[in-house]
Amino acid sequence: MIGDNAWLDALVRLLVIVALAAFVVLALTYLERKAVGRIQMRLGPMRTGPYGVLQSVADMIKLLTKEDVRPTTADRWVFELAPFATFVPVFLTLVALPFTDSWGVRVLELGLFYFVAVSALTIIGYIMAGWASDNKYALLGAMRGGAQLISYEVPLVLAVLAVAMVAGSLNLVEVVEAQGRVPIVVWQPLAFFIFVTGGLAEMFRRPFDIPIGESEIVGGPWIEYSGIRWGIIFGFTEYASLFAISVFGALIFLGGWDWPLGRELGWAWQLFLMFIKTSLLIFAFFWIGATFPRLRIDQLMSFCWKILLPMAFAQIFLNGLVLVYEWPDWVLLLTSGAALAATVYLIYAATKATPAHRAALPEAV
Amino acid sequence: MLGVLKAMATTFSTMMRKPVTIQYPTVHRELPERNKGFPLLLWDFDVDEPFCTGCHACERACPVECMTVTMKDNPLHAEGKSKRRKIVDEFWIDYARCMRCDICVEVCNFEAIAMNNSWAAQELSSYDRGDLVLDLNQLLAQSRAKKIEPWVAP
């Protein structure tokens, strides 16, 4: 509380989170280009400022000053509001995240539930943009995005639910405190795997960037956007949601600000822990994105419904067994690890299987 | 599925490697000795005059007719300092027209003309086409400043 004034307090907290989001977005734009550049044995941006650190500022100035074009046949208000409809949910998720044990904009009793509920609202912006652009590629992308986001939301929510079962709470602070000794990723590797996969799909990052695939549907729902609206979508929404999901994953899987020694060493160490864990997740997302080519929409769907979803249910069922019979914690690791191995085998078998029409052909000599 | 991990390992090891990028306008890669830039004239430091006698051999051989040469009596020969009776008076090469075929260098009897193997022959962009027609002084400048080591056929 600042000065016993609830309004002032809320305002200051919101300003801090807005500034943080803006800074993180600028930093991540630059860092992703650097990381992907290095992965491709390039240098990445080098010209704007020392080692190109001002590149994202230059990009921002360019996007701000560019002409904001709207097609004459577009549905005006829906078209112009769609970027905000994609960005606001991401911002709402940032509001509910605790960054240390005592600092977050607002710590909610149902923080876990709130996060997954609000982050899924992004799809409204995608559908709005796709519909209002009056462009078949935009509509196609929006439809793909809708299908993908709704499909992957289900295993993602179930994975988060498995965490809530083990931690015994939906309050993010309590979830973090429940991992004081051991982070949940140790007990729930399968849930973590599902979370990372679902998170990638939810952010439309490679290899799950089917709705916004440049080479297939030229940018999907954002095909008609330019200038600052495109900047809001691409700069802000993409990287802010990457940041939000990574903070969320660090909180519920990697022990957040508590493990190790967070409670004993105070807020500076807690912030440092959060920074390290979030950076690790963000780097993993960059790395995965720079490694794998884009999937096909049917592969994506069958992977979600045939493998991820049953395995998420299996995880919850196994957790239920362990928790009801009050078996020791390491049984959680055993069951979840076995289920993860089974998932890996399923994916392996599915990728190895010969399609029926090719099995019928004679063997090539 | 193992391929997924292998792919991740590959990209990670690539990331640890040194980037291959050369920061071009600030860093120039070394050019090969026999790089064919545009032709230029060489300076004879022994007598302090061009090697070129203005014999028109290159001008006649040039397939795109980018050269113009005129010849005069050599004043240094009259003073007895030079063995060349005739010497080049004016020499123009239109770099916009030259196709860097190397024929002028091949036909020259005095090794007076050479292909520029330095970066100076690569960065010639100009706003005016006329700037690319070089006269005798411009053609000789690089050699007089000793900023070129022309490749000579063995």
Image (cartoon, helix red, strand yellow):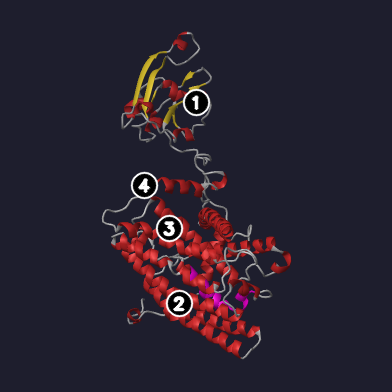
Which residue is the extreme one toward the top?
A: B79
Per the image, label 1 sits on a secondary structure element best described as helix
Q: Which residue is mark 1?
A: B143
Q: Earlier in the sequence, mark 4 or mark 2?
A: 4
Mark pair 1, 2: CA separation: 74 Å
Depth-wise, is mark 4 or mark 1 nearer the camera?
4
Tell me the kind of residue under disc 2.
Val
Q: Which residue is mark 3?
A: A233
Q: Which is more toward the observer, A170 or A304?
A: A170
Mark pair 4, 2: CA separation: 39 Å
Residue A301, position in %: x, y?
A: 40, 75
Q: Earlier in the sequence, mark 3 or mark 2?
A: 2
- Using a 10 Å C-alpha cutoff, classify the residue at mark 2 as few (fewer than 14 neighbours), some (14 to 19) or many (20 or more): some
Which residue is the extreme one toward the left?
A: A73
Q: Which residue is mark 2?
A: A154
Q: Mark 2 falls within which chain?
A: A
**Numbered mark located on residue A67 in the image:** 4
Quadrant housing the C terminus of chain A: bottom left
Q: Is residue B32 left or right of residue B100?
A: right
Depth-wise, is mark 1 or mark 3 nearer the camera?
3
Residue A107, position in %: x, y?
A: 58, 68
Q: Are marks 1 and 2 on the same chain?
A: no
Numbered range of the magenta stretch: A183-199
- Using a 10 Å C-alpha cutoff, classify the residue at mark 3 as few (fewer than 14 neighbours), some (14 to 19) or many (20 or more): many
Per the image, label 4 sits on a secondary structure element best described as loop
Tell me the kind of residue under disc 3.
Ile
Tell me the kind of residue under disc 4.
Glu
Circles 3, 2 touching at the beta carbon (< 8 Å): no
